[in-house]
Image (cartoon, grey):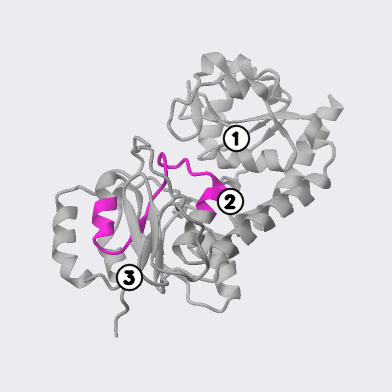
Amino acid sequence: MKSALHYGRRRVLGAVVALVALGITGCAAEQSDGGSTSSAPSAAAADGVFPVTVESALGTATIPAAPQRVVTLGQGSAETAIALGQIPVGIEKYEWGSDSTGYLPWIHEAVTKAGAELPKQFAGGDTLDVEAILELDPDVILAPWSGITQEQYDVLSGIAPTVAYPGKAWSTDWDEQIKIIGRALGKPSQAQGLIDQINQRFADAAASRPNYPQHTFSYIYTNGPGTLGVFLPTEQRVAMVAKLGLKVDPVVETFPETEGTDSALIGLEKAEELRNSELIFTFYTDAQTRREIEAQPLYAAIPAVAKGAVVASDDNPFVTASSMINPLTVPWVIDRYLPQIDEKLALLDKK
């Protein structure tokens, strides 16, 4: 017998396919206007109590009973669901960060360790495979840190209750994401426990590196030659480094958000403003792009770059894991991150 969450999915297949054909799934990279809705409940949620209602910038999801078949979109939601003991039946594929297994390694490791079946993977972004999601017969779709559009949300909500982001796309704080997922799955107390564990892991790592607070950093990115952007302190990859003890260069606070995703595209002509960043954190899409970026005089003149004090891994899974804070990535990243940072700080000490 189907659960109360079946939602008449087979009945909406024709409508969904028709909407997809009309192209209303849109581009997942587009930004929401944010809105003023909040995922926070009006009253304290209790474990295992349903129905649960979760508001988002794109709409309201009412989950009538404990979900058994979970599908996740964006990043971080799959990891949190797994940590809460709810292995998704389907997850958005992220090829750039996957290893030889075809999965993000920390997800593959956790699911394999649990002796469970690996989730089905499907295309996301502007090629969101709605039909694949429909075939997974989900009870709930989790996308609190994603870029799904209003059009995509409307289609997905016709398949199952869909939990989107509370403000702007790709801008949900890491702990808020965990709380949202915990609420949607009826496990708010366990979710808070995960947040506490993550904070403790960071605290332990920071305590092991008492010299880190003496050094400043900026986390930058480029969109190709001639460009320069800086991630803001609330962005998850910056928050991860800061929680290890390093200090965000105060100049970063002066840059206005221009991308709508916790970042500021300041332009290469302002590279000199990063002169007090002792360390630079960044990533490159490939080796050729890195050579092109580093060959630019203005970029090369950034003091940390000139000194070689740049933390930039060429391991795509690591870059992906260090870009998001969740129960699976944090323990996977910390032991890999600290030696990289130590190496660059030792380099500074020799200058």
Residue 87 x, y percent position in the rendering: 49, 70
Residue 174: say if magenta: yes
Question: Looking at the image, which residue is at 62% across and 40% down?
Answer: 239
Residue 346 location, quadrant: top right
- Labels 3 and 1: the sequence-earlier one: 3
SS under mark 3: loop
Question: Looking at the image, which residue is at 58% across and 16% down?
Answer: 298
- Which of discs 3 and 1 lies nearer the camera? The answer is 3
- The residue under label 2 is 321
Task: Specify whether 174 is left or right of 185.
Answer: right
Position of the C terminus by quadrant: top right
- The residue under label 1 is 282
Q: Which residues are magenta?
A: 153-178
Q: Is residue 183 visible?
A: yes
Q: Amino acid at mark 2?
A: Ala
Specify the label residue 136 is tagged with: 3
For the residue carrying disc 1, how many other residues have a C-alpha within 10 Å: few (<14), some (14-19), or many (20+)? some
Residue 327 x, y percent position in the rendering: 61, 58
Q: Is residue 78 visible?
A: no
Q: Is residue 58 above or below residue 221?
A: below
SS under mark 1: loop
SS under mark 2: helix
- Labels 2 and 1: the sequence-earlier one: 1
Q: CA distance from mark 3 to mark 1?
A: 37 Å
Q: Amino acid at mark 1?
A: Thr
For the residue carrying disc 3, how many other residues have a C-alpha within 10 Å: few (<14), some (14-19), or many (20+)? some
For the residue carrying disc 2, how many other residues have a C-alpha within 10 Å: few (<14), some (14-19), or many (20+)? many
Residue 69 x, y percent position in the rendering: 39, 72
